[in-house]
Every structure is written in C-alpha cells, then in structure tokens.
Amino acid sequence: MEFKELDPILHSQLRLAVVSLLIGVREAEFTFLKEKTNATAGNLSVQINKLKDAGYIEVIKQFSNNYPQTICKITKKGIDAFEAYVHALQSYMNPGG
C-alpha cells in the first residue's frame, strides 16, 4: 500500500477551511471567510495570498459603497487540488482497500 502525498498548500488548517468554504459557494467576501473561519484578518490575509500564489483561488479587490471589498473565488486548479487532497486523505482512512 502506498500512501499518497498530501498537498502542503491544503494541509494547513486555515487554508483547507478557506478552500472548503469556497468549494461550496464558489466565491466569497473576505469578511465572510473571516467570520466562518474565526481567523484574524492578518493571518487570513497571509493564507489567502498563499492560496492565490498557488493558483487555487482568484482574489478580486473592488469597492462597494466606497468601501474596499475583497472577493475570493475558487479556480479550476483549486477544485482539482481539493478533490485530489480529499482522495489522498481517503487512502489514509482506508489503507487496505
């Protein structure tokens, strides 16, 4: 039995939480992600940048009613990486089968 390597980008709890949320909603505002993950703005910002640099999410900065707004969108690469990660995890949970 060979265990699949787990994606180091998704193996961080906060990055995995962000991608999991985005899988469900496709795109979300920074404040929504901050609320749902209970992360500090600074930490969330750093982790979002790591996901963006990996190509897993797209970050759109815009203004809404004169307030800055950051939208995070899951990419095809992000969806594929998440599915591969889940598949790899399953191999750990069922090593015999």
Image (tube, rainbow, N blue to C red):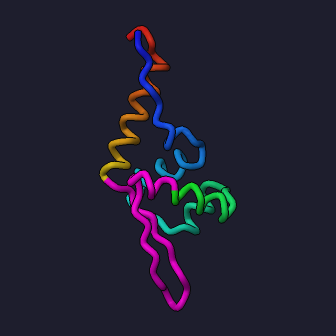
Q: Is residue 32 left or right of residue 24?
A: right
The residue positioned farthest toward the left in the image shown: 76
Q: Position of residue 40 (x, y in %)?
A: 69, 61
> Compared with residue 68, is residue 29 higher up or lower down, i.e. above or below?
above
- The front one of 50 and 74 is 50
Q: What's the magenta region?
A: 50-75
Q: Position of residue 72 (x, y in %)?
A: 45, 64
Residue 40 colored in magenta in the image: no
- Residue name at image x 38 percent, y 54 percent: 55
Quadrant in the picture for the C terminus = top left
Q: Is residue 5 left or right of residue 83?
A: right
> Compared with residue 46, is residue 8 higher up or lower down, i.e. above or below?
above
Magenta segment main secondary structure: strand
Q: Position of residue 36 (x, y in %)?
A: 60, 57
Total tally of numbered discs in the picture: 0
- Residue name at image x 42 percent, y 27 percent: 88
Q: Is residue 29 left or right of residue 75?
A: right
The residue positioned farthest toward the bottom in the image shown: 66
Quadrant in the picture for the N terminus = top left
The residue positioned farthest toward the front in the image shown: 53
Residue 59 colored in magenta in the image: yes
> Compared with residue 60, is residue 15 higher up or lower down, i.e. above or below?
above
- The front one of 2 and 73 is 2
Q: Position of residue 31 (x, y in %)?
A: 58, 68
- Residue name at image x 50 percent, y 72 percent: 70
- Residue name at image x 41 percent, y 14 percent: 2
> Compared with residue 59, is residue 16 higher up or lower down, i.e. above or below?
above
